[in-house]
Amino acid sequence: MPSAPDRAQSIYHMCRRAEWCAAAAEGIYRGSSQDVADGFIHFSTADQLRASAAKHRAGQRDLVLLTVDARVLGQALRWEPARGGELFPHLYGPLPVAAVTRVDELPLALDGGHLFPPGVPPAPPDNLGGGGGR
C-alpha cells in the first residue's frame, strides 16, 4: 500500500452545502452520492485540488470546501493511484466532523471555475484565483 505524501497533513473535499449541513448535524459525513457509489470518500491534496475541481465540479454551485486533518483519519485513509497514476487520498469509512478543520464557500468565477479562498490551497504563481476541483 502506498504511503501518504509527506506534504499532505491537510487534504480537501468538495461537497454540496446541504450535504455538509446534514453531516454537521449528525457528526459524520458519509460522502456524496458519487463517493457512496465508489465505496470511499474522494479527497485531493493541495496540489491536486484545482484539477479535481475542474474535472469533477466545474460549473457546480452551492459547494463548500472541507479542509481535513489527514493525520487523524488513521488506517481508513488510503493513498491510491488514480489520474495518471498519481496517489490520491481515499477514505474508506465516514468522515468524523471533528476532523474537519475549516469549511469555506466555493463560489463560481465567470468562467465556471471555482474561486478558492485565500491560502486554501495555495494558488500556483500563474493562477490569480479562479480554476477547478473535487
Image (cartoon, rainbow, N blue to C red):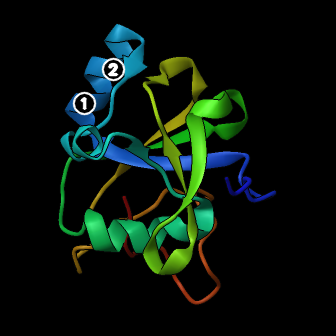
What residue is shown at x 59% (from left), y 39% (from top)? 77
- Residue that extends furthest to the front in the rendered view of this protein: 1
Label 2 and label 1: CA atoms lie apart by 6 Å
- Vertical placement of residue 97 versus 126, above or below: above
Q: Quadrant of the C terminus?
A: bottom left
Circles 2 and 1: CB distance less than 8 Å? yes
What residue is shown at x 74% (from left), y 54% (from top)? 3
Residue 9 coordinates in the image, percent (x, y): 73, 46
Report the disc number at residue 19.
Answer: 1
Residue 57 coordinates in the image, percent (x, y): 26, 62
Residue wearing tag 2: 23
Circle 2 sits in a helix, a strand or a loop, which is it? Answer: helix
Residue 19 coordinates in the image, percent (x, y): 24, 30
Answer left or right for 64 relative to 126.
left
Please state which amino acid type lies under the numbered disc 2. Ala
Instruction: Please tell me which residue lies in front, 24 or 123.
Output: 24
Please state which amino acid type lies under the numbered disc 1. Glu
Residue 64 visible in the displayed image? no
Circle 1 sits in a helix, a strand or a loop, which is it? Answer: helix
Answer left or right for 127 relative to 22.
right
Instruction: Please tell me which residue lies in front, 76 or 62.
Output: 76
> How many residues crowd mark 1 within 10 Å: few (<14), some (14–19), many (20+)?
some
Residue 106 visible in the displayed image? yes
Residue 51 appears in which quarter of the rendering?
Answer: bottom left
What residue is shown at x 22% (from left), y 47% (from top)? 34
- Vertical placement of residue 52 versus 62, above or below: below
Residue 118 appears in which quarter of the rendering?
Answer: bottom right
Residue 13 coordinates in the image, percent (x, y): 44, 47
Answer left or right for 32 relative to 70.
left
What residue is shown at x 43% (from left), y 25% (from top)? 94
